[in-house]
Image: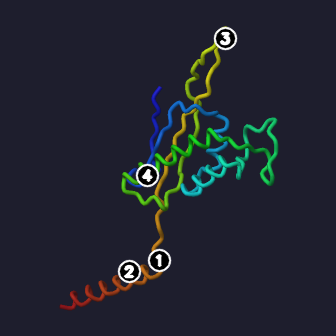
Amino acid sequence: MANNYTFKDYDKDNMARVLGRALPISFKQSVEICSLIRGRELSYAKDALSKIMEHKKAVPFRRFRHNIGHKTKIGPGRYPERASNEILKLMNSVEANAQFKGLNTANLFITHINANEAGKVMRAGRKRSRRAKRTNIEIVVQAKATKPSTKEKTIASEKATIQKIQNVEEKKR
């Protein structure tokens, strides 16, 4: 089955995208990590994932939280290292894609990130086999529009007034 995604809300020239297919990570942990970094800046997300791998920051589990120990100030949470490492690799890849497209990588933010369950691969076993965990992850980043400074605004307004004056003088001739 093919994915028929349409990015109507996105400016295709101003975005970069990466797909991670059949990653060997837990779907449930991936969902919680995605909800943690969705809508954030790419630099914040990369920093948060590195802190998660070092056990300095815990991922709050909001959806899949049955029998999970509580962490300080966040409630139920864990430190999913393998999932964080794989998602961090995808973050580096999407940043490289954005740089290749000519986007400014300093002001990228995550507009879309989601995790889907991939096909279950059967692992080896003598009497019975097991299903391996597989997850598809999609990340879309967009360059945030920078606001012009006050100095740039005043220069633009001065140019506009000069242009108006020149137009009035030309009409008088």
Q: Which residue is mark 3?
A: 128
* Kind of residue indicated by mark 3: Arg
Left of 151 or right of it: where is 40?
Answer: right
* Crowd tier of the residue under label 1, counting other residues whose Cα lies within 10 Å: few below 14, some 14–19, many 20 or above: few
- Compare residues 92 and 3 and report the one nearer the observer: 92
- Tell me what residue is drawn at x 67 percent, y 8 percent: 127
Q: Which residue is mark 4?
A: 15
* Kind of residue indicated by mark 1: Ser
Dot 1: what SS?
A: loop
- Tell me what residue is drawn at x 52 percent, y 56 percent: 109
Cα distance in 3D space between marks 2 and 4: 28 Å
* Kind of residue indicated by mark 4: Met
Left of 92 or right of it: where is 30?
Answer: right
* Kind of residue indicated by mark 2: Ala
In primary-sequence order, the first of circles 3 and 2 is: 3
- Tell me what residue is drawn at x 54 percent, y 47 percent: 112
Q: Which residue is mark 2?
A: 156
Cα distance in 3D space between marks 4 and 1: 24 Å
For discs 1 and 2, the disc positioned in front in the rendered view:
1
Dot 4: what SS?
A: strand
Dot 2: what SS?
A: helix
Q: Which residue is mark 1?
A: 149
**Is 64 situated above or below 166?**
above
Point out residue 154 in the picture as x, y percentages from the top left corner: 42, 84
For discs 2 and 4, the disc positioned in front in the rendered view:
4
